[in-house]
Amino acid sequence: MPGLSARNRLYLPEGIEILKLTIKRSKNSFFSKLSEKASTQLNIEITQLPQANSYVVFAYSYGKNLDRYINDLLRTNILFRSKIRQIKYWQDRSLYYIIAIKSKCEFFKLAEDHHIAILSPYVFDRGVRQYIAIGEEGSMKSYIDHLTRYYGPGNVEFSRVNTINQINRLLLRRSLLSILFDKLTESELKVLRLAYRSGYFDYPRRSNLENLGVKLNLSKVTVSIHLRKILKKVFDELMQFVETN
């Protein structure tokens, strides 16, 4: 690409390209409808069961009152149209989980047929499917053509990922939490859990440094140092993500 800085350029094997894709309208998708109705983002993992003509979809979201929207959709025929044979969901604190078994997945099959890999997880954001695809240039062109025919002209958009900043942003969005937990020590995680559960971060605060110190058998100063180190590590990672946007 003309004008692209060599320092920031993403060097890929010859003939391979990475695309960021958006599908504005998904046909007969339960998860697209749920994301749209709940006005939230769903993170999606999908895989084909070995030696079975079935797909497992695992979804999770922080959307509020998601169970209400799920129950509303279950009263329609969207499961039948989505080829979903079984579905289970539950809530753990503020996070919702959904597992579904599908007899067919046109979206995933289309990528498989064109030898295209889809980075996981991908998302539905208020009904719009967003994901990263990797494949050979010739296969990718055919894949985009088939996507456009299947979902309709104007509903498929794509852009090439060709800079380090772009790939950093995409990968950090998917792995930020694991990076943070890898960087925090066991002692710091212990302090963080107690501070959160005790209401130290609430407004107004339900606990203070002295209370935390008593429970942890640490001095007030030591607890303060732990929390400042934790926040520094968290903000170091967050700012790395923010500054690539």
Image (cartoon, rainbow, N blue to C red):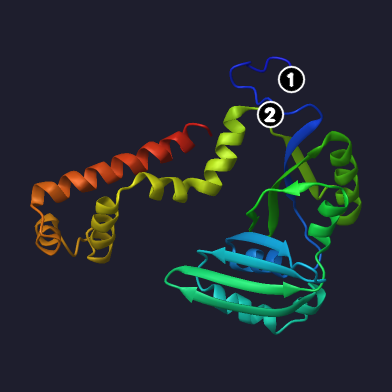
- Residue 174, above or below 63: above
Q: Which mark is residue 1?
A: 1
- Badge 1: residue crowd in 10 Å (few <14, some 14–19, many ≥20): few
Would residue 181 appear left or right of 118 to someone viewing this image?
left
Q: Which mark is residue 104?
A: none
Residue 212 percent across, percent down from the top left = 15, 60
Would residue 221 appear left or right of 133 to someone viewing this image?
left
- Badge 2: residue crowd in 10 Å (few <14, some 14–19, many ≥20): some
Q: What residue is at 16 percent from the left and 62 percent from the top?
A: 207
Would residue 136 appear left or right of 3 to someone viewing this image?
right
Q: Is residue 201 visible?
A: no
Q: Nearer the viewer, residue 44 or 16?
A: 16
Residue 135 percent across, percent down from the top left = 79, 40
Dot 1 and dot 2 residues touching (CB under 8 Å): yes
> In the displayed image of the protein, which residue is found farthest to the front?
51
Disc 1 from disc 2: Cα separation: 9 Å
Q: What residue is at 10 percent from the left and 47 percent from the top?
A: 221
Secondary structure category for the residue under label 2: loop
- Residue 220, above or below 78: above
Q: How many marks?
A: 2
Q: Nearer the viewer, residue 136 or 152?
A: 136
> In the displayed image of the protein, which residue is found farthest to the bottom?
75
Given the image, on which type of amino acid does mark 2 rest? Asn
Q: Is residue 31 visible?
A: yes
Reading the image, the residue beneath label 2 is: 162
Secondary structure category for the residue under label 1: loop
- Residue 116, above or below 129: above
Q: What residue is at 75 percent from the left and 47 percent from the top?
A: 117
Given the image, on which type of amino acid does mark 1 rest? Met
